[in-house]
Image (spheres, rainbow, N blue to C red):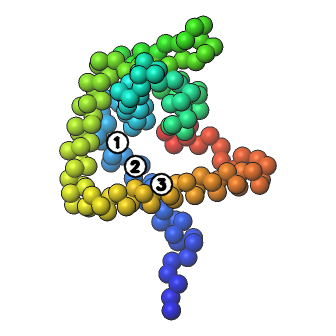
Amino acid sequence: MTEGPDITTLSNELTYRKYLMNKDKIREFFQKISIPEYIALHNISLDQEMSSIYEGRTYLKELSEKMQLTIRQTSKMIGDLRDKGLVTWSHDGNGSEGTYVTITEMGQKLLKEQEEILQAYYGKVIQKFGKENLIQLLQLMKQLETIMSSEIEEMTEMSGAEVLTDHDEYNG
């Protein structure tokens, strides 16, 4: 009875697959904004549609947590989106209560254009791969991501030092 691939082989394959998914091929679909900017705009737009409590505001701290970025990284990205006219960036009171962003009409238009590009591509992919297969894969990926995150936390706590540095800075 064979055991199948060992942990090293599986680890390398998982790392390689993640690398391929993040490589330049998918970035070809993002001409006007980056993938993180698209994700931020999408989240800001969703908040605007869903939240009557916060008057459509997305607080920088919440966006930072959702995107798993530092406040500094999120601030830089939001500054870039603001400079492109895609969001407005404001604050409550004197700013100590938090800063927030809202998507502009131009931001909504660009987001819609980007979504149409992705829908055209992923529509074909989903048709060939199967919707149920994709749903199952996404559920499994979420489970895997949760386990991987908890392992990183445990390793960090056990070592008493950071196992990982701020790798998002150079991974993009």
> Residue pushed farthest bottom?
1
- Quick check: marks 2 and 1 in contact, CB under 8 Å? yes
The residue tagged 3 is 142
Q: Earlier in the sequence, mark 2 or mark 3?
A: 2
Rendering quarter of residue 99: top right
Q: In this view, does 121 lie above or below 57?
A: below
> Residue pushed farthest front?
53
- Camera-nearest label, 2 or 3: 3
Q: Where is residue 94 in the image (x, y as percent from the top left)?
A: 60, 7
Question: Depth check: 51 or 130 in front?
Answer: 51
Q: What element carries label 1?
A: helix
Q: Is mark 3 on a helix, strand or loop?
A: helix
Q: In this view, does 146 lie above or below 100?
A: below
Marks 2/3: CA–CA distance: 20 Å
Q: Can residue 167 be seen in this view?
A: yes
Q: Earlier in the sequence, mark 3 or mark 1?
A: 1
Residue 23: give its label.
2
Rendering quarter of residue 7: bottom right
Crowding around mark 1 (Cα neighbors within 10 Å: few <14, some 14 to 19, many 20+) is few
Name the amino acid type tagged 3: Lys
Q: Residue at (32%, 48%) from the top-left corner?
A: 25
Marks 2/1: CA–CA distance: 7 Å
Name the amino acid type tagged 1: Arg
